[in-house]
Amino acid sequence: MKKHYQDKNECRICGSHRLMKYFDFGPMPLVNRYVSGEEGAERIPLAVMFCEDCANSQLSVVVDPYFMFSNYLYHSSVSKTFKEHCAAMALDLQERLNRGSLRCLDIASNDGCLLKEFQKKGFETVGVDPAQNLCEIARQGGIRTICSLWGDAAAEEVIKEFGKVDVVTATNVFAHVDDTHAFVAAVSRVLTDEGVFVVEFPYMGNLIKYHEFDTIYHEHVSYFLARPLVQLFKMHKMDVCDLKEFPDIHGGSLRLYVVKEQNRTIARRPKRVETFLKDEADAGLHTIGPYQGLDTRANKLRTDFAGLLDDLRGKNKKVAGYGASAKGNVFVNFCGIDRRDLLFIVDDTVAKQGFCSPGTDIPIVSQKRLYEELPDYLVILAWNFSEEIMNKTREFRERGGKYIIAIPEVRIV
Ligand code: DWN
């Protein structure tokens, strides 16, 4: 079988070789690659390393991005919570830039979820995404989309077809990028001098604080703090002029507002940025300490979860899952769970239904199956959307069902 990954032994932010491994899953499947049969069996080393020079965390390998992203079954628009988050971002940018119409580029625009909210505000929009299947969906929804990974060639095409832009957004993509410097250089090229680059990602401080080990998988080649990124942008003559935290998005996300050094048209909040950087340092996150206990905490969660499943099995209780998320697929693989433990996993993404959770024999089904089988317990594997999923499955609760959530600790809800 062709090898789809390369080892990575230098920091992608500062170039250091002083990388210290602190969490090693061993070989794991690609948890967002839904294929059947032999193809799905491929397992790739999954381990996280800490850069002793800039404190960035990154995987020890890089998987071919075309192999991972050219046919991508994660549709951002499935989640109402995330759509509302996109609408709020559109309003935030309209107020922050206060310039009437804006020309906006979204990198990794997925099914057009964010750009649709920008269009509602009257912004001109263009998306870039490598997944042919998602580009088709976005274009059918009226979103002009270039099918490509982001880089210099894509920036050239945007400038040629659309012109330079006032806003570049990159939500949940920057952590997926191996060559962060080329990515930022291409952003700087496509952005006007008065423009703003808005980058949003799951914040490493929350991963550590809430033991979110299941958000570690091959798509996420980096696990970002604020300080390494401030340094990265500085190398490209760009400043983080403001930031905002979103505790309820993807396990706790951080948004950075980045402008070119010469840009004086957008309000800067240096105090807020400095305070955040100080808090990050005070939490010890720029040293290896807080990271070294993550695997112990993950193993304890696995033991607690296995103990609960054994207890429920002993009482002949039926257990299923909800949310065939990348994190959920990591969790079931890490815990060594199969269809004897979880009868099935419900997912509202039609494109995922009919496959199994990658690396396991657990079928992914529609919500219809939930009410046909009516399990006693439902493990919410997409725990970042627990409220939304519990609201959506109220009838399950009303008919006596209970929920299990495993992060940050195993509990019955
Ligand atoms: O960075 C990434 C994050 C942001 O999103 C990507 N690498 C891939 C993806 O990771 P994930 O799959 O862990 O993300 P989610 O958004 O936690 O996945 C939620 C899953 O749950 C999806 O498969 C959709 C499903 N879902 C559902 O079936 N019904 C979600 C909701 C809210 C629902 O009501």
Image: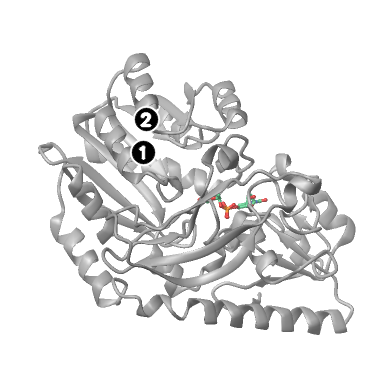
The local secondary structure at tag 2 comes to strand
Left or right of 32? Residue 355 is right
Q: Quadrant of residue 238?
A: top left
13 or 188, nearer to the observer? 13
- Which residue occupies 30% across, 53% down? 13
Left or right of 291? Residue 309 is right
The answer to whether 316 is drawn above or below residue 207 in the figure is: below
Q: Quadrant of residue 407?
A: bottom right
Type of amino acid at the residue the image marks with label 2: Leu
The location of residue 159, given as percent across then percent down, is: 31, 19
- Which residue occupies 40% across, 32% down? 118
- Residue corresponding to mark 2: 105
The number of discs equals 2
The local secondary structure at tag 1 comes to strand
237 or 351, nearer to the observer? 237
The location of residue 106, given as percent across then percent down, is: 40, 34
The answer to whether 274 is drawn above or below residue 199 in the figure is: below
Left or right of 142? Residue 380 is right
Mark 2–mark 1 distance (CA, rounded to whole Å) = 6 Å
- Which residue occupies 22% across, 65% down? 277
Type of amino acid at the residue the image marks with label 1: Thr
The answer to whether 186 is drawn above or below residue 271 in the figure is: above
- Residue corresponding to mark 1: 169
The answer to the question of whether label 2 and label 1 lie on touching residues, with beta carbons closer than 8 A, is yes
The location of residue 35, given as percent across then percent down, is: 74, 44
Q: In which quarter of the image is the C terminus?
A: bottom right
**N-terminal label among 2 and 1:** 2
Q: Quadrant of residue 359?
A: bottom right
The location of residue 60, given as percent across then percent down, is: 47, 60
Residue lying farthest top?
161
Q: In which quarter of the image is the N terminus?
A: top right
